[in-house]
Each structure stands twice: as C-alpha cells, then as structure tokens.
Amino acid sequence: MYERKTLPNLNCGLDLIGEVLYGKWKMRLLWFINEGHQRPSELQRKIPDASRRVLNIQLKELEEHELVSKIIYPVVPPKVEYSLTDFGKTLIPVISAIGNWGDANEERLRSLILKRLESYNQ
C-alpha cells in the first residue's frame, strides 16, 4: 500500500478538506451512502468505473477520518454496511453545493474538459 513520504500541508481549511476528500470517488461515496446505499456491492454498482480495491481503500480512509462508520454483522457470509457519522453528515450540504455548481456550469465544464483531453491525444 502507498505510504506518504512527506507530511501534508495542513495550514488552512482548504488544505484540511483536500486531505480528507482527496480521492476520485470519496464525494460520490459519501453522497451515495447518504442516499441509503450502504453495502459495498451497492456502492460498486453505483460507481462501476471504480475497482472494488480502490473503493475499499477510500472507504477505509473515510472511516479513519470519522466521516463514515462500518458495521460488520456476524453472519456467514459476512455482511458489511456503511453509514455516515454525524460528522460526515455535515459534508452533505457542501457536496450538494459543489454538485449544483457543476450542474449549473455543465456545458461549459464538459466543453473545457473535452477540449483539454483532445489536446492530450494529439
């Protein structure tokens, strides 16, 4: 597993939130858990582009940051469910605001992203 070689810069709120939410799927995971998709298999279906391994790593990091809690039920096969902590629930309005901004600027952002990708492929 990846081990960090230098300590992160934690001097302001943006540094802190970046450290906690850094990861391609973390905001989506938080959003989908908030919507009630609690089982790893449900989350995998909601985010099919992510590998199971990456989702598990990012869920573990969210758990370490006390944004989600994990419950393991003592049944065979083991049943695992994730839920947002009270602390994690405080991020939902922030994620919603970011999503709304993306929706409001969808055409412009999509055009800019595709333009950038086209320049890489030339």
Image: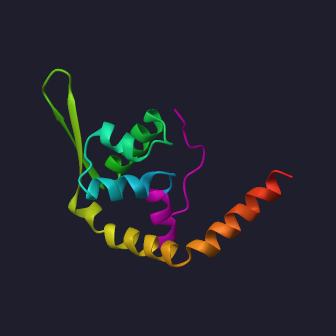
> Would you say residue 11 is visible in this rendering?
no
Residue at the image position 43 percent from the left and 53 percent from the top? 26
| Image side of residue 93 versus residue 70, left or right | right
The answer to whether residue 73 is above or below residue 97 is above
What segment is highlighted magenta in the picture?
1-21
Residue placed most toward the observer, 115 or 62: 115
**Residue 111 among magenta residues:** no
21 over 46 or under it: above or below: below
**Would residue 49 be found to the left or right of residue 28 on screen?**
right
Q: Nearer the viewer, residue 59 or 51?
A: 51
Q: Residue at x 55, y 52 (%)?
A: 7
Q: Position of residue 104 (x, y in %)?
A: 51, 79
Residue 10 % position (x, y): 50, 64
103 in relation to 77, above or below: below
Q: Is residue 6 visible?
A: yes
Q: Would you say 111 lies left or right of 38 here?
A: right
35, above or below 69, in the image: below
Q: Position of residue 18 (x, y in %)?
A: 50, 62
Residue 56, percent across and down?
39, 38
Q: Residue furthest right?
A: 122
Number of numbered discs visible in the structure rendering: 0
The residue depicted at 50 percent of the width and 52 percent of the height is 23
Identity of the residue drawn at 46% across and 42% down = 48
